[in-house]
Image (cartoon, grey):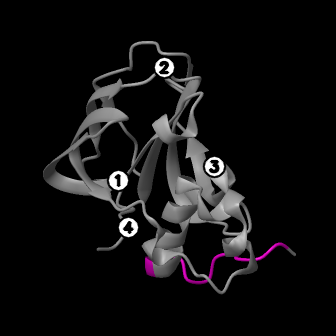
Amino acid sequence: MQPHNNSERMTPIIKNITVKHPANFTWLKYVSGVDLSHHCAKSLLGTYEQRWHRYGNKPIWSPLTLPVSPFYYFCAVTPRWENNAHVAFVYKEGATMIVDNDQVYMEVENAEALPINQDCIDWNLPQSQDKAFNTCRNWWFASYLAKHYYPNCKKYKY
């Protein structure tokens, strides 16, 4: 699977997002690279969706046609980190992605979910031993992208 950059193609369309716990804020990022020297949102390079960056548990903006991006990352930050919602996805023409877990229900047309787990962490990186990094789901996904798409990304603080 390769990231898509063709501006002539269809794009993902968010049909529904229901965050299942009270959220302090939510964001969607159009991810175009990674920086493993940071954790949290700074590890995912790109731009934020400005049409609905929200604070609180307000209704979520659907349908919403997304612009072309190599990758997409949705996060809902709650008062309890274990209730935070994280969904990573990529464009896939004709597919319907449905994520339904304890944190979020999300339906997106022309999309496929990508993994967010610790499987791709490079445990040789010094920061991988730091709990702030190795428990951060944003950094887990950045590690996945670094392994599969951006092997020459920034990995250390200089």
The residue that disc 1 covers is 89
Residue lying furthest left: 94
| Range covered by the magenta-colored residues | 148-157
* Label 2: which secondary element: loop
The tag on residue 41 is: 3
Task: Please state the horizontal and vertical placement of residue 92, each as a whole percent of the image.
Answer: 22, 57
Task: Please state the horizontal and vertical placement of residue 3, each as a whole percent of the image.
Answer: 38, 67
Task: Please state the horizontal and vertical placement of residue 25, each as a whole percent of the image.
Answer: 57, 25
The residue that disc 2 covers is 22
The residue that disc 4 covers is 3
Which residue shows up at 43% across the image and 64% down it? 117
Q: CA distance from mark 3 to mark 1?
A: 15 Å
Which kind of residue does numbered mark 3 sit on? Ala
The tag on residue 134 is: none
Which kind of residue does numbered mark 1 sit on? Phe
Which sits earlier in the primary sequence, circle 4 or circle 2?
Answer: 4
| Of labels 3 and 2, the one closer to you | 2
